[in-house]
Image (cartoon, rainbow, N blue to C red):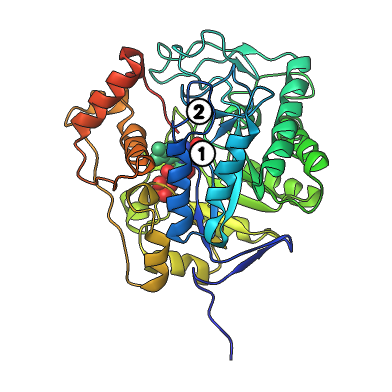
């Protein structure tokens, strides 16, 4: 008898780890670090709730590899100043219930609000456009010495993550952050070995992967979150994305998660995605089907999944090997248990708006509202799906001051 693969089926990742099911908690920046950017009790409580909630694999919110380059004020940073004991407690709580926990590693590059840095770095001095110029300072181009230093940091942090009990790492190469900036011909205008043709533009990602692999050994899973496309004129596109996956697979990557967009084109949270795609739930399924033709490692598809039916459909057609979930898990950490128990289970997310579009964009409501839900879980409270968007905007204002009312996205 042949058994049908569902979201409940276990998955062997490159013969390195067995994940108990196909539900993958995608990274969500929690903004729950302390003033030293270390993990807090709230963060640990949040991850314990997710581990108990039944997902097979949890990816942490982005952990920054350089404390001088934060995307948000309360990001977790892992560096020489970090108290590793706190990271060990975080990994321990996240691994309860037989759960895998991978640390997502990130450098924001130019996607740093100007209240955090007046001098961000990027492959090239290309400012963010589309009305974001006033909220984000124009970056300066990295020198080769700095590029090599950042590569080393990714590797160093990976080795510490392993030491602290995380069971894998994920390189954040999507959503317009530094690694994605190198991949994009629009953002990367360099004429040295780090820019120009795709081989050069992917060198930064490849060297990060190689340095990490050398630091953690062959048995430790290393994954990547990659854009299917930036959805931006002259940006990283699907053809580039497929090529990058091919090369990473040859090099030994263990898992690829796909998403799309950046701060200028936030398709990762469904912005600009067509009604028909939204109805079908998954934003990047067409691309996933193309990518599957060349995949030799598991492919995670993230963005838009809301029902067990759509998730099982994507697994059964072979478009996805795992289902990435973010916002639904901020409203129900136990959602994976429910999806597995009931194949008719589905979750509707509220349409978020204060009624004033400019304010929604300015306060980055789609992210901050969910971060407030994460904070509630971190405090031991229930999420509040009816949380007023106005309260969320007010809380954002109070915690960060008016500077927070500048565009920023995940
Ligand atoms: C509050 C919040 C924070 C996020 N932070 C990150 C992050 O740190 N790294 C990342 O790769 N994606 C981040 N994302 C994007 C999610 O991982 C995911 O790609 C996106 O929300 C679409 O999935 P969903 O429809 O299941 O929410 C974030 C999303 C939200 C809502």
Q: Residue 300: x and y, percent?
A: 56, 55
| Screen quadrant of the C terminus | top left
Residue 11 shows in the view: yes
- 10 Å neighbourhood of mark 1: few (<14), some, or many (≥20)? many
Residue 140, by quadrant, is top right
Disc 1 residue lies near ligand 1 with CB under 8 A: yes
- Front residue of 309/221: it is 221
Which residue is depicted at the point 56% across and 9% down?
A: 119
Q: Quadrant of the N terminus?
A: bottom right
* Residue 261 place in picture, x, y as percent: 48, 37
Q: Secondary structure at mark 2?
A: loop
Q: Is residue 2 left or right of residue 392?
A: right
Is 280 rendered above or below residue 393?
A: below
Residue at image coords 28%, 19%: 398
Residue 61: give its label: 1
In the image, 337 versus 203, the foreground residue is 337
Position of 87 with respect to 210 (left or right) is left
Residue drawn 34% across the image and 52% down it:
278
Q: Are marks 2 and 1 in contact (CB under 8 Å)?
A: yes
For disc 2, the marked residue is: 75
In this rendering, the answer to whether 356 lies above or below 54 is above
Residue 208 x/y as whole percent? 74, 34
Helix, strand or loop at disc 1? loop
Within 10 angstroms of label 2, few (less than 14), some, or many (20 or more) residues? many
């Amino acid at each position: 008898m042949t058994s049908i693969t569902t979201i409940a089926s276990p998955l062997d990742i490159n013969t390195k780890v067995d994940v108990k099911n196909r539900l993958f908690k995608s990274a969500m920046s929690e903004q729950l670090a302390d003033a030293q950017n270390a993990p807090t009790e709230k963060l640990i409580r949040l991850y314990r709730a997710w581990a108990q909630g039944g997902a097979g694999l949890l990816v942490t919110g982005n952990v920054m590899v350089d404390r001088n380059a934060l995307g948000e004020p309360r990001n977790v940073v892992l560096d020489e100043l970090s108290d590793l004991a706190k990271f060990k407690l975080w990994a321990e709580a996240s691994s309860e219930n037989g759960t895998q926990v991978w640390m997502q590693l990130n450098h924001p590059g130019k996607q740093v609000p100007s209240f955090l840095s007046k001098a961000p770095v990027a492959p090239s001095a290309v400012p963010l456009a589309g009305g974001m110029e006033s909220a984000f300072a124009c970056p300066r181009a990295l020198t080769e010495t700095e590029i090599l230093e950042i590569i080393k940091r990714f590797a160093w942090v990976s080795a510490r993550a392993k030491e602290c009990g995380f069971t894998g790492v994920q390189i954040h190469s999507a959503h317009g952050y530094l690694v994605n900036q190198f991949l994009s011909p629009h953002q990367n205008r360099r004429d040295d070995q780090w820019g120009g043709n795709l081989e050069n533009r992917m060198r930064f990602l490849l060297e990060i992967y190689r340095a990490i692999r050398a630091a953690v050994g062959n048995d430790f899973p290393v994954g990547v979150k990659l854009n299917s496309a930036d959805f931006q004129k002259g940006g990283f596109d699907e053809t580039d994305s497929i090529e990058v996956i091919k090369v990473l697979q040859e090099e030994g990557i263990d898992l690829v998660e796909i998403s799309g967009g950046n701060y200028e084109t936030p398709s990762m949270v469904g912005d600009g995605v067509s009604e028909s795609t939204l109805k079908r739930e998954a934003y990047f399924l067409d691309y996933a089907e193309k990518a599957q033709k060349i995949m030799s490692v598991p492919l995670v598809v993230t963005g838009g999944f809301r029902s067990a039916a759509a998730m099982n459909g994507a697994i059964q057609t072979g478009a996805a090997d795992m289902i990435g979930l973010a916002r639904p898990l901020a409203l129900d950490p136990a959602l994976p248990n429910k999806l597995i128990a009931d194949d008719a289970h589905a979750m509707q997310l509220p349409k978020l708006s204060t009624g004033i579009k400019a304010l929604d964009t300015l306060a980055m409501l789609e992210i901050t509202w969910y971060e407030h839900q994460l904070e509630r879980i971190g405090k031991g409270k229930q999420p509040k799906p009816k949380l007023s968007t106005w309260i969320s905007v007010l809380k954002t204002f109070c915690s960060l001051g008016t500077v927070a009312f500048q565009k920023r996205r995940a």
